[in-house]
Image: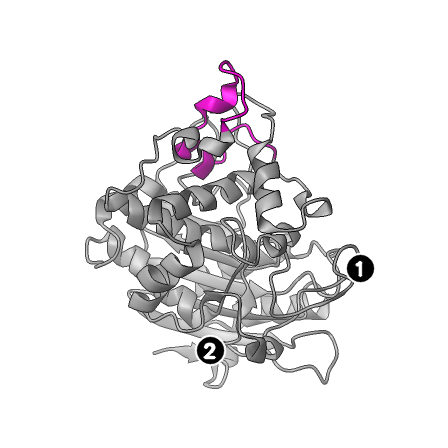
Amino acid sequence: MSDSEMGGGRAGRFAAAYQVAEEAIAARGVPGCAFGALAGGEVVLQGAAGHFTYEAESPFVRPETVFDLASVSKVVATTAAAMLLTQRGRFDVDSRLGEVLPEFVAHRAKDDPAREITIRHLLSHASGLPGYVEFFRTARDRDSLLRACFDLQLEAMPGTRAEYSDPGFILLGKALEVCAGESLDSFAARELFAPLGLASTCFHPAAADRAAIPPTEIDERFRQRRIQGEVQDENAWVLGGVAGHAGLFSNVPDLLRFAKEILEGAAGRSELFARETVEMFARRQAPAGSSRALGWDTPSEKSSAGRHFSPHSIGHLGYSGCSLWIDLEAAVAVALLTNRTWPDRGSQLIRQVRPAFHDAVREAL
């Protein structure tokens, strides 16, 4: 039996999870949130709390409300596409990046260590590339931003340091497009979202749908306007809204359906993901001490997943306040979607909210 916002979930076994959400809203950590959980192959929780913004007349968030996933795009679109292309023999994670994107090495000296970067390095955030670059300050279109990314200099030798890198995933997204022979959004829509029935998951929400998406911020440093129904990440916006690191929009029902397919893959029952592929991408990578698998993160000490997700779990966070965690051992998944950056990026309360929420859900199960 499923607990839902309209069906008594607030008074049911997930009451503590609702309380975490409502306390976060009262503390102005998030204006609202949608959430859900999967256990034993069934959706056991779909709920929501709060509004699109802090104004009382703002629309209520519903379990099916679509949010800007931010970096959760890295797993639901980019990593999932890499998984499919890998098992089809069209994408080799041990290929050098320069073999797939010659533009990345064309101007480099023969002894430049950047020539040694592999796709595996990008997926595991061990490329040595910088963590974040404000390309949008000077790049005004997709081509100029990609050129700036091709020109980046390393901050560490490939494979020696784990540092979460958006530029690495921008390059990864471009490499996937080369191997797929089409844009990332086109490939993901046809090969991932359509087969799984993810009708609310897309890059570029239609203009008519934007008012039904919670706004992410009042942007006073770049676009000088309210950001709603378009990607919040500035680099992704300059890239046209489709990028390896950000740009995807989705809702709780779709994310739980995606998580179920990952779990089916881990059990050898998926038509999309082979067990070997899930195991390969869920395995922690070098350097030692890193929590990063291939594309996915895994629980670390004081993880956002809380205290009850097993070491054999995979997940990802998004800057907008979204997250998805999947416990491959317990066959449990939890999605939490928020727009914690509204009206600005100041609040960091989400760091306490996520583990508390996950703990409440897992303890209820």
Residue 165 seen anywhere in this rendered image of the structure:
no
In the rendering, at what x and y percent does residue 278 appear? Answer: 29, 47
With respect to residue 50, does 296 lie above or below? Answer: above
Q: Amino acid at mark 1?
A: Glu
Residue 232 in the image: above or below residue 228? above
Q: CA distance from mark 2 to mark 1?
A: 42 Å
Q: Which residue is labeled 1 in the image?
A: 220
Residue at x 52% of width, y 73% of height? 15
Secondary structure, mark 2, is loop
Decide which of 268, 127 is in the foreground and name it.
127
- Front residue of 285 and 109: 109
- Residue of label 2: 12
Q: Is residue 49 above or below residue 131?
A: below
Q: Nearer the viewer, mark 2 or mark 1?
A: 1
Report the magenta residues as a range.
105-130
Q: Main secondary structure of the magenta part?
A: loop
Image x and y of residue 183, in percent: 42, 54
Residue 175 % position (x, y): 42, 41
Check the picture and name the quadrant holding the C terminus. bottom left
